[in-house]
Image (cartoon, helix red, strand yellow):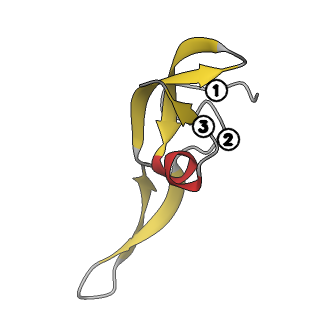
């Protein structure tokens, strides 16, 4: 598992990206684009853990949610 920060997925390591904010007059400035992270109870190696996961990992079935 990758080393993660507060706004990163603990499974895949995905974090914030930098994108461009473009106004109607086409003035371009940098902005930080956060990913969708939510905390879930999951089952990993037979034990129950509480992890911050991105929705891409949840949808793709990389983790098994604890029911």
On the rendered image, what quadrant is the C terminus found in? top left
Q: Is residue 12 left or right of residue 35?
A: right
Task: Kindly report the distance in space between the C-alpha atoms of the residues bearing marks 2 and 3.
Answer: 11 Å
Residue shown at 49% from the left, 28% from the top: 52
Give how far across and how far down residue 23 sits, in percent. 27, 79
**Residue 56 badge:** none
Question: Which residue was labeled with disc 1?
Answer: 4
Indicate the quadrant where residue 12 lies: top right
Estimate the x, y position of residue 29 in percent, counting from the top left. 40, 67
Residues at discs 2 and 1 in contact (Cβ within 8 Å): no
Q: Secondary structure at mark 1?
A: loop
Residue drawn 47% across the image and 24% down it: 66
Observer-nearest residue: 51 or 27? 51
In the rendered image, the vertical position of residue 1 relative to residue 29, given as above or below: above
* Left or right: where 8 falls relative to 21: right
Give the distance between the C-alpha atoms of the residues marked 1 and 3, in whole angstroms.
17 Å
Residue displayed at 23% across by 87% down: 24
């Amino acid at each position: 598992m990758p080393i993660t920060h507060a706004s990163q997925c603990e499974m895949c390591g995905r974090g914030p990206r930098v994108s461009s904010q473009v106004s109607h007059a086409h003035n371009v400035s940098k902005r930080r684009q956060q990913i969708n992270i939510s905390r879930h109870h999951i089952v990993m190696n037979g034990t129950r853990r509480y992890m911050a996961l991105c929705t891409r990992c949840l949808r793709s079935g990389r983790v098994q949610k604890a029911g």
